[in-house]
C-alpha cells in the first residue's frame, strides 16, 4: 500500500508542478527527476535486491523422474525376481531377458490433486520397467509397474495392463536379432558385391573402411505372403561421409538408389529370404534377374551421389558485409528475476509457477502450472513425434518414425551458452535410465528471460505515449533424434499466456532422385528432398480454476439480420456460442479463416460480467500442417490414431495418461493405448459420449498436434533452418481476468508531451539497467562442453559408480 500511495501522490505532485515549468523549451531540463520519483526508484531497487532466485517448492515434486538410487533399487529388485530371468544389461545378448528402460509412472491425477490441493498424502511412487524378453522364440517387450518406492518388503511388480486397450502390456518384437540382421545385410550385399562396386563404386562388408551404411524402413512391415504373415524389411545403401567432410553427419543426404527386400520372419537367419532388388524404379524379384539385367545392354546406370563440401554445415560463400563484427546479444543486467528450486524442479516466474521433469520417452514435461495461484494446466508435454515420409522407393515410402521409440530424453544433450540459450541462462541437468545405466546430460535444460524484440503494449496520442516492455520467460531443451534436432520451448508471457513451440533443424532424410519428382524437389545433383509430414502430439490437461471445465467454440459467422432500427435486413456477422458435447464433435480442425475461438472455460466461475472465465487455445506459428496427410498409413496402422486431426478433446482418465507409447514402433498394428483408441473412434461406430450429457462439465484433456508438411527445397541444404521449420500453439486468458494482466508490470513508461516538449515522465519503479557489463567475461568457453555422465546401475558397485562414460553417442 505504501508503494501505491507514493505512486499516486507522486503523479499528482508532478501534474501539479507541471504548469510553472511548461514554458521551458527544453524537454531535457524537464526530465530531471523529482524527489518522489527517486523514492519510487529506491523502493524498486530494494525489491530487486531482496528478490531471491532460489525458492522452495511449496510441495514435493511428485512428478519428478526416478533418482539414480530409485532406478538402481528398482533394477536390483527386478533382478531378484527369478521368474523374470534377467541378465544384466551390460552382458545381455539377443537371447537374454534384459531391462531396457526404467522411469516414473506418473501418479494418478486424483491422488496428485488430493496431495497438491487438499492436504492429502504424498501419492505412492511407482516405476515403470520396460523389459525385453529375448530368451524365447517369440521375443517381446513388456511394461511392468514396480512399487511402491522406495523398494521395501511391500513392493511388488505387475504387468502394466491397465494402461492398455488390449489388456496386455506385452508387445512382440519382430526385430530382436540386430547383430544377425547386420550380418544378413552384409551377406546379401556380398552376393552382388561386383554390381554394388560397379553401380555405387564402393563396398559394405563390415570392415572399418566400409563405404556404405545399410538400413531402411522403420517400423518393419508385415505382409501376407502365401497366406502367412511375414516380417518384411526393405533396405538401402547410404554412403558414409568421407574425406575432409567425414565429421559431418550427412549420411542421410547420401542415399545411393539401390534397394533390397528381405523376409526376416523368425529368429533363424537361415530361414530369412531375399525377396528382390530395386534399382532405377525397376524391381527384380531375384538376384539372378538383377544380375542378368545389369549385364545386359541397355541397362540404365544412374549417377553417383557422393559426399563433398556440400554436406558440410561450415560457413561457406562470400561473407555478409560487416558480419565479422559481434552481433547484438541479450544480457541480464541486474540478476535473475525468476526463482528455481533445483532439487524439486520447481520454477516461479512473475505470476506463474510449475513443476517439471524429464522422461526418457518424451523429454521435458510440465506439471501443475499455476497462474496467480490457480490451476491452469495439470500436465503439458509431448506424446509422440511422427515423421512420415513418402517416395517412389520403398524405403522412403516405408519410413514413418515414431520418435518416442528412440526417446527424447536420451538425446537431450548439453546446450551451448551464447548459442542455444543466452549466456546468463539458468542451466539444469537432466537424467534418464536406460540399459541399467543412469545418464545425466549436464546443462541440457535452460531457463531464461528475454526481450523478444517487440513491445507488449503501446499507445500514443498528441499528448502522451504509453509503452510496456514484453519480457518473456522460456524453458528450453533440444533433442537430437537421429538426423533431426528438435528444439522445444515453453514460453510464458506477462499477459498470462503460455506458448509451446517446436522447431526442427539438422539433416533431412533425403531420397535418391531417380523418378522421385512426384515426391520431392531435386535439391542436388542426384538427390530428391523426400517429402514428409511431421506431426508432434501434445497432451494439454487443462484445469481452469478447477477440473470441471467445458470446451466451447465461439463462432464468428456471417448473418442476415433484421434490426428494429432498419427496414431492410443487413449483411453482417455475429458471435455464436456452442458447447462441444461429444467425441464426434471433439475431433477438431483449426477453423477456416480463424472464424472460431476454441476455449476451455469454467462455466461455474463466471467473471463479474457473467462471462465464464476461460483460456483460449490456438495455433500460433508455422501453419503448414497440423495432422498427417495420410489417414490410413500402411506403416503406422493403429499407431497414428492421434495424428489425424489438429485437436482432440477427451475426458480425463487415469488409464489414458498417454496417447502413444515408445513400444508402438515394435508392432504398430497391435498396440494402442486407450486414449489413442478413443481418439480414432467415430459416430457410426456408436461410441458413447466423451463428455457426459448429464453434466455439462468434465475434466478436459486436449491432444493437440503441431507439425509441418515438409517438402525440403534447396534451402534445407545442408540443414533445415529453425526460422521456417517451426510450429506452435498458445493458450491465453479469455475473459479470465478483468483486464490485461501485463498492466501489473513495472517495466512501462508514460511520456506526456505537447509541442513545448515533454511535460512529465511517469515511471513505475522498474529500475533501468545499470552498471558495467564485462562482455569479455560473458564470452562462452566452448571447451567447457562435456557431453554425458553415465552411471552403471547394475551390478551396482557403490565404490565405482562411474564405471562407464559416453560422449554424445550417435543415435540409432
Ligand atoms: C504544454 O503543457 C504545459 C503543461 O500543461 C502547458 O503549460 C503548456 O502551455 C503546453 N504547451 C502548449 C504549446 O500547449
Ligand atoms: C516491494 O517491496 C515492498 C516492501 O518490501 C513490498 O510491499 C512490495 O510488495 C514489493 N513489491 C514487489 C513487486 O515485490
Ligand atoms: C536383491 O537381493 C540381494 C541378495 O539377496 C539383496 O542384497 C538386495 O537387497 C535385494 N534387492 C532388493 C531391492 O530387494
Ligand atoms: C533364462 O534365460 C537364459 C538366457 O539368458 C536362457 O538360456 C534360459 O533358458 C532362461 N531360463 C528360463 C527358465 O527361461
Ligand atoms: C517388512 O519390513 C518391515 C520394516 O522393515 C518389518 O517390520 C516387517 O516385519 C517386514 N515384513 C515382512 C513380512 O517381512
Ligand atoms: C570410385 O572410387 C575410387 C576409389 O575410391 C575412386 O578413385 C574413383 O574416382 C571413383 N569413381 C567414381 C566414378 O567416382
Ligand atoms: C571388405 O571389402 C574391402 C574392400 O573390397 C576389402 O578390402 C576387405 O578385405 C573386405 N573385408 C571383409 C571382412 O571381407
Ligand atoms: C549438473 O551436473 C554437474 C556435473 O555432474 C554437477 O556438477 C552440477 O552440480 C549439476 N547441476 C545441477 C543444477 O544439478
Ligand atoms: C421504415 O420505413 C417506413 C416507411 O418508409 C418509415 O416510415 C420508417 O421510419 C422506416 N423505419 C426505419 C427504422 O427506418
Ligand atoms: C491408477 O489408476 C488406475 C486406473 O484406474 C488403477 O488401476 C491404478 O491402481 C491406480 N494406481 C494407484 C497407485 O492407485
Ligand atoms: C467411421 O466408422 C465407419 C464404420 O466403421 C468407417 O467406415 C468410417 O471410415 C469411419 N470414418 C472415419 C472418419 O474414421
Ligand atoms: C573482463 O573480463 C575479462 C575476462 O574475464 C577480464 O580479463 C577483464 O579483466 C575484465 N575487464 C574488466 C574491466 O573487468
Ligand atoms: Cu522435415
Image (cartoon, rainbow, N blue to C red):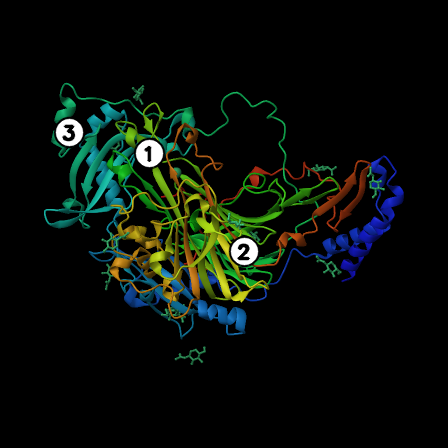
- Which type of secondary structure does the marked residue at label 3 adopt? helix
Q: Nearer the viewer, residue 172 or 598?
A: 598
Residue that numbered label 3 is attached to: 290
> Where's residue 582, x and y in %?
36, 61
> Where's residue 359, x and y in %?
44, 55
Q: Residue at x 54, y 74 (%)?
A: 119
Q: Earlier in the sequence, mark 3 or mark 2?
A: 3
Q: Is residue 729 left or right of residue 217?
A: right
Q: Residue at x 73, y 56 (%)?
A: 47
For the residues labelled 1 and 3, the Cα–Cα distance comes to 26 Å
Q: Nearer the viewer, residue 659 or 569?
A: 569
Asked whether mark 3 lies closer than 8 Å to ligand 7, one says no
Mark whose residue sits in front, 2 or 1 = 2
Asked whether mark 2 lies closer than 8 Å to ligand 2, one says no
Q: Classify the position of ligand 2 by quadrant: top left, top right, bottom left or bottom right.
A: bottom right
**Callout 1: few (<14), some (14-19), or many (20+) C-alpha neighbours within 10 Å?**
many
> Where's residue 801, x and y in %?
47, 56
For the residues labelled 2 and 1, the Cα–Cα distance comes to 41 Å
* Residue 800 visible in the snapshot: no
- Which type of secondary structure does the marked residue at label 1 adopt? loop
**Callout 2: few (<14), some (14-19), or many (20+) C-alpha neighbours within 10 Å?**
many
Residue that numbered label 1 is attached to: 530
Cβ–Cβ under 8 Å for marks 3 and 2: no
Cβ–Cβ under 8 Å for marks 2 and 1: no
Amino acid at each position: 500500500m505504501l508503494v501505491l500511495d507514493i505512486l499516486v501522490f507522486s503523479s499528482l505532485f508532478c501534474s501539479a508542478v507541471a504548469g510553472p515549468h511548461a514554458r521551458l523549451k527544453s524537454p531535457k531540463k524537464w526530465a530531471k527527476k523529482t524527489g518522489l520519483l527517486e523514492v519510487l526508484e529506491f523502493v524498486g531497487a530494494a525489491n530487486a535486491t531482496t528478490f531471491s532466485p532460489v525458492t522452495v517448492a511449496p510441495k514435493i515434486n511428485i512428478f519428478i523422474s526416478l533418482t539414480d538410487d530409485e532406478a538402481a533399487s528398482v533394477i536390483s529388485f527386478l533382478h531378484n525376481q527369478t521368474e523374470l530371468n534377467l541378465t544384466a544389461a551390460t552382458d545381455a545378448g539377443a537371447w537374454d531377458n534384459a531391462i531396457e528402460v526404467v522411469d516414473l509412472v506418473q501418479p494418478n491425477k486424483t491422488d496428485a490433486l488430493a496431495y497438491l490441493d487438499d492436504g492429502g498424502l504424498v501419492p505412492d511412487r511407482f516405476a515403470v520397467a520396460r523389459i525385453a524378453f529375448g530368451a524365447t522364440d517369440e521375443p517381446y517387450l513388456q511394461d511392468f509397474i514396480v512399487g511402491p518406492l522406495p523398494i521395501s518388503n511391500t513392493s511388488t511388480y505387475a504387468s502394466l495392463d491397465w494402461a492398455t486397450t488390449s489388456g496386455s502390456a506385452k508387445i512382440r518384437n519382430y526385430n530382436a536379432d540386430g547383430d544377425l540382421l547386420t550380418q544378413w545385410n552384409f551377406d546379401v550385399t556380398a552376393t552382388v558385391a561386383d554390381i554394388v562396386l560397379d553401380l555405387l563404386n564402393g563396398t559394405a562388408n563390415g570392415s572399418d573402411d566400409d563405404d556404405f551404411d545399410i538400413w531402411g524402413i522403420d517400423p518393419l512391415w508385415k505382409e501376407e505372403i502365401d497366406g502367412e504373415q511375414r516380417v518384411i524389411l526393405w533396405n538401402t545403401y547410404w554412403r558414409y561421409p568421407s574425406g575432409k567432410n567425414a565429421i559431418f553427419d550427412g549420411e542421410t543426404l547420401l542415399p545411393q538408389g539401390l534397394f533390397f527386400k528381405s523376409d526376416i520372419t523368425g529368429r533363424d537367419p537361415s530361414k530369412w529370404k531375399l525377396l528382390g532388388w530395386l534399382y532405377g524404379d525397376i524391381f527384380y524379384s531375384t538376384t539372378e534377374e538383377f544380375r542378368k539385367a545389369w549385364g545386359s545392354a541397355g541397362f540404365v546406370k544412374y549417377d553417383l551421389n557422393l559426399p563433398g563440401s556440400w554436406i558440410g554445415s561450415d560457413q561457406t560463400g562470400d561473407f555478409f558485409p560487416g558480419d565479422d563484427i559481434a552481433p547484438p546479444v541479450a544480457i541480464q543486467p541486474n540478476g535473475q528475476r525468476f526463482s528455481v528450486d533445483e532439487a524439486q524442479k520447481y520454477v516461479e516466474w512473475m505470476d506463474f509457477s510449475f513443476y517439471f521433469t524429464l522422461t526418457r520417452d518424451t523429454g521435458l514435461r510440465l506439471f501443475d502450472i499455476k497462474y496467480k495461484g490457480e490451476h491452469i494446466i495439470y500436465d503439458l508435454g509431448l506424446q509422440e513425434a511422427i515423421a512420415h515420409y513418402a517416395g517412389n522407393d520403398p524405403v522412403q515410402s516405408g519410413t514413418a518414425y515414431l520418435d518416442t521409440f528412440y526417446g527424447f530424453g536420451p538425446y537431450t544433450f548439453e546446450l551451448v551458452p551464447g548459442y542455444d540459450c543466452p549466456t546468463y541462462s539458468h542451466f539444469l541437468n537432466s537424467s534418464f535410465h536406460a540399459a541399467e545405466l543412469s545418464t545425466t546430460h549436464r546443462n541440457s535444460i535452460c531457463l531464461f528471460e528475454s526481450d523478444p524484440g517487440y513491445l507488449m503494449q503501446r499507445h500514443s496520442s498528441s499528448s502522451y505515449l504509453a509503452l510496456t516492455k514484453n519480457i518473456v520467460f522460456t524453458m528450453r531443451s533440444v533433442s537430437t533424434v537421429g538426423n533431426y534436432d528438435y528444439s522445444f520451448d515453453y514460453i510464458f508471457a506477462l499477459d498470462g499466456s503460455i506458448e509451446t513451440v517446436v522447431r526442427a533443424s539438422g539433416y533431412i532424410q533425403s531420397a535418391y532422385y531417380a523418378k522421385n519428382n512426384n515426391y520431392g524437389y531435386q535439391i542436388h545433383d542426384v538427390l530428391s528432398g523426400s517429402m514428409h509430414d511431421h506431426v508432434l502430439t501434445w497432451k494439454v490437461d487443462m484445469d481452469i480454476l478447477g477440473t470441471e471445465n467445458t470446451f466451447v467454440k465461439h463462432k464468428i459467422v456471417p448473418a442476415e439480420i433484421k434490426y428494429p432500427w432498419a427496414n431492410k435486413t443487413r449483411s453482417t456477422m455475429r458471435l455464436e456460442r456452442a458447447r462441444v458435447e461429444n467425441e464426434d464433435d471433439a475431433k477438431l480442425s483449426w477453423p477456416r479463416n480463424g472464424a472460431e475461438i476454441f476455449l476451455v472455460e469454467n462455466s461455474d466461475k463466471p467473471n463479474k460480467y457473467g462471462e465464464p472465465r476461460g483460456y483460449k487455445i490456438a495455433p500460433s506459428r508455422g501453419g503448414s500442417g497440423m495432422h498427417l496427410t495420410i489417414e490410413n498409413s500402411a506403416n503406422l496402422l493403429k499407431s497414428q490414431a492421434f495424428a489425424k486431426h489438429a485437436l482432440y478433446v477427451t475426458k480425463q482418465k487415469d488409464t489414458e495418461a498417454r496417447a502413444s507409447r515408445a513400444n508402438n514402433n515394435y508392432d504398430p498394428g497391435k498396440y494402442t493405448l486407450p486414449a489413442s483408441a478413443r481418439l480414432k473412434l467415430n459416430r457410426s461406430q456408436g461410441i458413447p459420449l466423451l463428455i457426459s450429457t448429464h453434466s455439462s462439465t468434465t475434466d478436459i484433456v486436449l491432444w493437440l498436434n503441431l507439425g509441418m508438411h515438409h517438402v525440403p527445397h534447396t534451402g534445407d541444404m545442408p540443414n533445415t533452418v529453425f526460422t521456417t521449420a517451426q510450429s506452435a500453439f498458445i493458450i491465453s486468458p479469455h475473459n479470465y481476468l478483468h483486464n490485461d494482466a501485463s498492466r501489473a508490470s513495472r517495466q512501462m513508461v508514460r511520456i506526456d508531451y505537447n509541442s513545448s516538449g515533454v511535460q512529465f515522465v511517469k515511471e513505475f519503479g522498474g529500475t533501468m539497467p545499470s552498471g558495467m557489463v564485462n562482455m569479455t567475461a560473458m564470452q562462452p568457453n566452448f571447451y567447457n562442453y562435456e557431453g554425458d555422465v553415465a552411471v552403471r546401475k547394475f551390478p551396482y558397485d557403490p565404490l565405482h559408480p562411474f564405471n562407464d562414460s559416453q560422449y554424445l553417442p550417435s543415435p540409432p
